Amino acid sequence: MSWSIRRKLGGAPVNITAPDEGVNRREHLLPTTRLEAFSDGVFAIAITLLVIELHVPAGNEVLVGGLEHEWPRYLGYFVSFAFIGGVWIAHSNMTRFLKAADPDLMRLNLVLLLFVSFLPFTTAIAATHLFASNLSLHDVTISSTSERVAAVLFGLNLTLAALMLYLMLRHAGRTPDVAADDLAEEELAAFAAQRRAAVLLQASATVVGAFLSLLAVIFYLALAIFYVIDPVRLMRSRSLHRARLAGKPTEN
């Protein structure tokens, strides 16, 4: 049968399986509601576990001195809280442009959640070992080997989580039947380009951690704050751009 069809069309092969492949692909697509619900739960648990590492000074300690002694834990808490919050905002922004999730996107999401859920552990390592010789803000010394290792482990965890978010955005923008429409694909591509730059910055800060742990953690905090602010700024600027293209008045 297939030979006779090719003969009638001048020898050109006919792909009679493409429609079936398209149908099979759509059958493997899943609604995004499960992905969003499970992800939100993991984000909420991970961000809550961070506060467990904050210790209350004992009753017989001088309160101000006890709080000052715990400053590495506060710094680690703020870095991880801001980072997870930024990933959650970016993840929520991404799902706005999706109409379905394919198996590969679900797997990438699981790996992202793996690294996010690992953050309370690496944050605790950083808080315990990162500034072991610098517990007092009055005399900051050169970082020891264990402090540099703690800074690199913490930064590596942040970098891998940022990388997985970028890979999710890139996959969603390039995969047929996942993005809501052509405009959504453009939005996801622009968002992925922005997150790629963020991954490179995070990786660079991690390299700094191998030499200057305190400076690296300051970079981690600055990038985490950027992760919180930039998706909102990007979303607003893109909305204003679409409104201008549509000829609608915009608010300043």
Image (cartoon, rainbow, N blue to C red):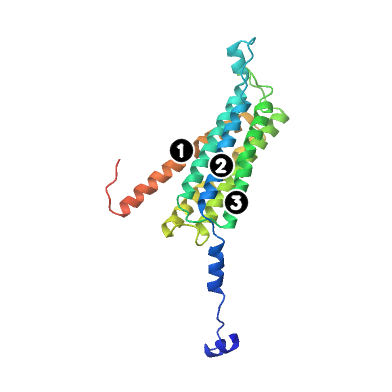
**Foreground label between 2 and 3:** 3
Q: Which residue is mark 2?
A: 201
From where the camera sits, is residue 203 visible?
A: no
Q: Earlier in the sequence, mark 2 or mark 1?
A: 2
- Image coordinates of residue 222 in percent, x first then y, are 52, 34
What kind of residue is marked 1? Ile
Does the CB distance between marks 2 and 1 fall below 8 Å?
Answer: no
Labels 1, 3: front one: 3
- Please tell me in which quadrant of the rendered image residue 212 appears: top right
Q: Quadrant of the N terminus?
A: bottom right
- Give the quadrant of residue 102: bottom right
Place of residue 88 in the rendered image (x, y in percent of width and height, measured from the top left): 52, 41
Left or right: 250 in relation to 65:
left
Number of residue marks: 3
Quadrant in the picture for the C terminus: top left
Relative to residue 25, is residue 145 depicted above or below? above
Could you say which is closer to the camera, residue 139 or residue 3?
3
Q: Position of residue 218 (x, y in %)?
A: 57, 31
The amino acid beneath tag 3 is Leu
Sequence-first tag of 1 and 3: 3
The amino acid beneath tag 2 is: Leu
Q: In percent of the image, x 59 and y 36: which residue is there?
A: 46
Q: Please name whichever residue, 82 or 241, is drawn nearer the observer in this view of the structure.
A: 82
Name the residue located 28 percent from the left edge and 50 percent from the top edge: 248
Asked if residue 169 lies left or right of residue 183, the reply is right
Quick one: label 2 or label 3, which is nearer the N terminus? 3
Secondary structure state at the residue bearing disc 2 = helix
Determine crowd level at label 2: few under 14, some 14-19, many 20+ residues with C-alpha closer than 10 A: some
Q: Secondary structure at mark 1?
A: helix
Query: What residue did someone put label 1 on?
Result: 229
Q: Dot 3: what SS?
A: helix
Mark 3 burial class by Cα count in 10 Å: few <14, some 14-19, many 20+: some
